[in-house]
Image (cartoon, rainbow, N blue to C red):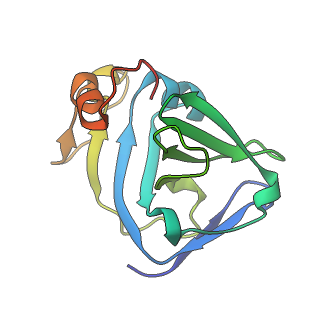
Amino acid sequence: MTRRSGHCLCGAVRFTATNWGSFGVCHCEQCRRWAGSALFAVDVAEGDLDVQGAEHIRSFRSSDWATRSFCGTCGSVLWYRYDKGVDGAGAYEVCLGLLDDANGFALKREIFADEKPDSWALDGQHDRLTRSECLAMFGSQSDGA
């Protein structure tokens, strides 16, 4: 995949990456409350995201196995990290809306699909995992995502 860049609303946090992974959507309650809707995000491996303005990033440990980061200046949601309880570790789930060019990604999966409000639906053929399937996949029975 080609090099892509992105930034928060105010531009204090900027990032670039060349190796972008799959595009997915999370419908868990925490993502909906944090992002104001489902979380639309693209995987980026731990060492593949180059971040500028890191001093503006604030992170919140939302469960014993994940953190959520946002811009401390403008409040933009930045990424989710499945870090297994190690701050600053794990792959990134970068919010699709932050990319300067978000075209060309194909939706691969919806997670916590059984928690999706009935007011929206995403078309197409892709994986739709339930809460219990997600918790089994992540190896946790924690309520937080």
Figure check: 63 above or below 41: above
Residue in the foreground of this view, choosing between 58 and 139: 139
Q: Residue at x 47, y 40 (%)?
A: 39
Left or right: 30, with 138 as reference point: right
Corner quadrant of residue 28: top left
Q: How many marks?
A: 0
x and y, in percent, of residue 143 in the image: 42, 17
Residue positioned 46% across, 55% down in the render: 91
Name the spot of residue 54 as percent of width and height, x first: 76, 59
Q: Residue furthest left?
A: 125
Return the residue found at the far bottom: 2
Query: In the displayed structure, does residue 99 sit left or right of residue 110?
Result: right
Q: Point out the residue furthest to the front here.
A: 86
Question: How far across and down, in percent of the image, does residue 81 sit?
Answer: 51, 46
**Above or below — where is 61 with respect to 59?**
above
| Quadrant assignment, res 9 | bottom right
The one of 52 and 89 positioned closer to us in this rendering: 89
Q: Which image quarter is the N terminus in?
A: bottom left
| Residue at 34% over, 27% down | 140
Tell me the quarter of the image containing the C terminus. Answer: top left
